[in-house]
Image: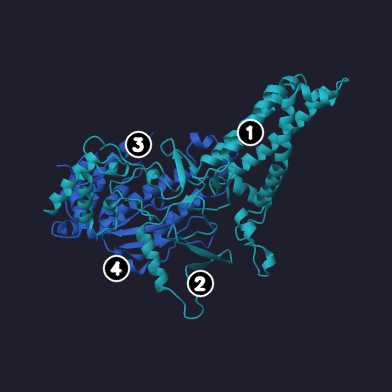
Chain colours: A blue, B cyan
Amino acid sequence: MISAPRTATDRTKLPYCHESFHNLQELRHSASLANKVFIQRDYTDGTICKFQTKFPSELDSRIERTLFEDTVKTLNNYYAEAEKIGGQSYLEGCLACLTVYLIFLCIETRYEKVLKKISRYIQEQNEKIYAPRGLLITDPIERGMRVVSLHSLQTTRDSNRSCETDQNTKTQRCHLSNTETTETRRGTGRRKLEKAGGEETLLSYLKATAGETERERMMMED
Amino acid sequence: MKNCEYQQIDPRTLRTSTTRTSSTLPCGRKSSHRLRRKWEVFPGKNRFYCDGRIMLARQCGVLPLTIGLIFITSGLFFTFDCPFLVHLTVFIPVIGGVLFVFVIVSLFQTSFTDPGILPRASPDEAADIERQIDNSGSSTYRPPPRTKEILINDQVVKLKYCFTCKMFRPPRTSHCSLCDNCVERFDHHCPWVGNCVGKRNYRFFYAFIVSLSFLTSFIFGCVITHLTLRSQGDKGIIQAIQDSPASVVELVICFFSIWSILGLSGFHTYLVASNLTTNEDIKGSWSSKRGEESGNPYTYNNIFTNCCVVLCGPMPPSLIDRRGFLPADDAPQTVTSDAELPPFMAKNDTNMEENCQEFALSCTA
């Protein structure tokens, strides 16, 4: 029997936290809005990328204020480093100008390097701090640098258990996608996900798919 | 039972359907590897080529004319004027060649690069913003709906809500009606290059117009020199023109374009030096004529710094990830203003099974 058309197949060169995010994407339909928190941009310093450090009230009981603020402040520092105007950026700009900007096709800019650092940082934060508390941060680049979004993982556990009996077709979709392993390179990881249960699922899944990300990223390069 | 029904629909849909939208279902074995990339479902009015590597506005305007004029003028120059002028100095064709390459490369980069398009807000974000708008509201003065005021460098800046993209536009961002996208640091939509000019491709655009003004001035000067040298030696100007009619064509093209190109270069040099965009300049956003204490909050108050920041600043990444793959959850996660997806793929459809059945019936009909 051909499976439902909502299983993960190829991945782009996104870090694996987006893999988990993708799982949550499917669950998003069943998750209520209260389980998502969006941290907006802070424009007081101009158009540079900076997020508000104000602690959202929805997270009061979920995570310590200091941890959250540290994460956002570190992210802001990373973005400030990427957009820093100084010697290196001028050198890059002048070199690019002389080569009629063709150099952008060949080398990775400093911004892109910092974005990779940010992805790794978010991954690490998810593993160490947020996943144990039942939350997941998504990389702002996924959202067009507009927001940092936090998802609650509570719905994962609840949805998995209630999927079969739930009449809502969206929840059904999540059941189908979580239990069926079809033409997907991530099939193994997904099986592990649905065999385990609850929040500890995410950690094991993250670890299981950690190795696959790099391989896939290389395969995706074209 | 419902699971079975849902699964039964898929094979029929997959076998009978040949449209692109249906091919996203992990349809059978044949197109299981055929995943859609994000550019295929991009909601803006853009055209994509080379599997998403190159993008243009849907209305590419007079880009073919621009390319044609440049190629024709340069071609005529290299064919008819250079052989004559190379006797003067060999650098003339060399400089001409370098300028020509600069112009063409920067033109293509301006036209084919993402100008800084902001992806539209996902439905969750849009709903979150809506909630915030409903909840907030001061008891005293209530600003017009859907604007937000923020302070940037002690300057009050109004952020407007974009109804198409369902988000508050960041500062200096504007929605281009021709491309139907919000573009960061929106300068203008240039029909000559067939694309918007924004944060990511402004430096290419500036390089294009500056090198083009050098090229047209150079060709103009060389043609004048050519005709002058030919008309010397008792030949007269009429004879010279008859000997080299192509030069007259180049002269006419260069003469008419030089005014506008030089003017545009001068204008954009002023904008770069004061860290303004065409959009802001035209609207007079930071003009002191308004009588308010307003100045450009983005300027560094130093011409050199402004130039460096605008032209040599860090190159921001493209936010639309056009070559990324769509997740197997078919419907795009962005808000679209027009419903192009067939009913069975509507994301917010709660009665999906009915639609699935309808579609199945229509396939078998």
What mark, if any, has residue A61 been given in the picture? 4
Identify the residue shown where x is 13% and y is 59%: A165
In this figure, which residue is indicated by the disc labeled 1? B70
Alpha carbon separation for disc pair 2 and 1: 48 Å
Q: Position of residue A121 (x, y in %)?
A: 37, 50
Mark 3 and mark 4 residues within 8 Å of each other at the beta carbon: no
* Disc 4 residue type (three-letter): Ser
Task: Residue lying at the far bottom in this picture: please name it.
Answer: B140
Asked whether the residues under marks 3 and 4 belong to the same chain, the reply is: yes
Q: Disc 3 residue type?
A: Met
Picture coordinates of residue B151 (x, y %)? 55, 66
Instruction: Give the labeled residue for mark 2.
Output: B144
Mark 1 to mark 4: distance in Å? 64 Å
Tell me the residue that label 3 is attached to.
A220
Badge 2 element? loop
- Please check whether the numbered discs 3 and 1 fall on a single chain: no
Mark sitting earlier along the chain (2/1)? 1
Badge 3 and badge 2 in a common chain: no
B42 up-or-down from B215: above or below = below
Mark in front: 2 vs 4: 2
